[in-house]
Image (cartoon, helix red, strand yellow):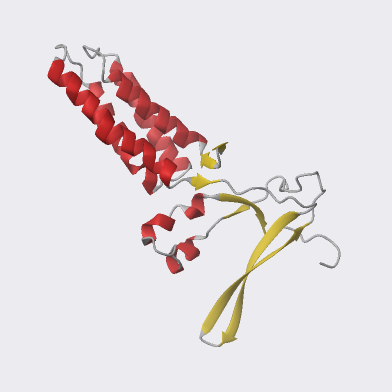
Amino acid sequence: MIEFLGIGFRYLELGVIAAALLLVGLLFIRRRPAGLVWVSVAAMGALLVHLYREEGRWQLVPIYALVFVLSIWLAVPGRKAYRLGGLIFRIALIVFLVVPALTLPLAVPLFVVPPPTGPYGVGVATLLVAPAEDANLPVTIRYPLDQAADGAGANPATGATLAPYWSLEDVGSNSLPGLPWLSSTHLPLVPTNSVLRGRRAAGIF
């Protein structure tokens, strides 16, 4: 994940955003050559790889739609140059569609969780407590992680699985106060520095 001003972007989704900006720029070519079909294929390929590898999120749905529609439109060669009306249409498209589509993932971002500042990393485990026979109560426990302190103290062991900020169960049972349920569905994609079921550090804490 790439961080900028506390906002995180995953690598492949940045590629999709770059592809969308490239396709928008190609709208201003006076005549669409046949070779643009390969640009469209590359843009659609980047979109599909992102959706498969990283999972999509609702904040990027307008970007996905732009890539899909513009890829199809640019794949068809155009022999006639657009006139003033076509230029106005393209400018309006940028103002009313492209700018809001780029603003949405900035307004509701994948934020970056800062690493622990102490000498230990953080391990996390979820236990099910059964206060009654017909009920299970999930309890999340965080504890000092068994790893060498390195100043930041937050580098997980190689191959360790990092816990998400929210689990899918959290999304199903919780919502952000005053906001619709959809606004929290991206939180399982936010990585943390907590290692799932990592080995506990020795000592009494």
Give the side of residue 67 with respect to residue 170, left or right.
left
Can you say which quadrant of the picture contains the C terminus? bottom right
Question: In the current view of this chain or complex, which residue is farthest to the bottom?
Answer: 132
Q: Is residue 64 above or below residue 139?
A: above
Give the residue drawn at x 40%, y 55%.
183
Q: Is residue 147 above or below residue 126?
A: above
Front-lying residue, 64 or 111: 111
Q: Can residue 68 be seen by looking at this rendering?
A: no
Q: Quadrant of residue 4?
A: top right
Classify residue 130 as left or right of residue 15.
Answer: right
Based on the displayed image, in which of its 4 quarters is residue 120 positioned? Answer: bottom right
- Identify the residue at horizontal 32%, vertical 38% (top origin): 100
Rendering coords of residue 181 (x, y %): 38, 61
Q: Is residue 134 above or below residue 2?
A: below
- Residue at the right extreme? 203
Instruction: Name the one closer to the observer, 151 or 80.
Output: 151
Residue 168, image x, y percentages: 48, 61
Q: Residue at x 19, y 19 (%)?
A: 87
In the visual, does 76 lie left or right of 119? Answer: left
Q: Is residue 55 visible?
A: yes
Task: Please state the total of marks drawn on the protein image.
Answer: 0
Q: Is residue 168 above or below residue 107?
A: below
Image quadrant in which the N terminus is located: top right
Residue 106 at x, y = what percent? 43, 41
Residue 93 rendering spot, x and y as whole percentages: 23, 30
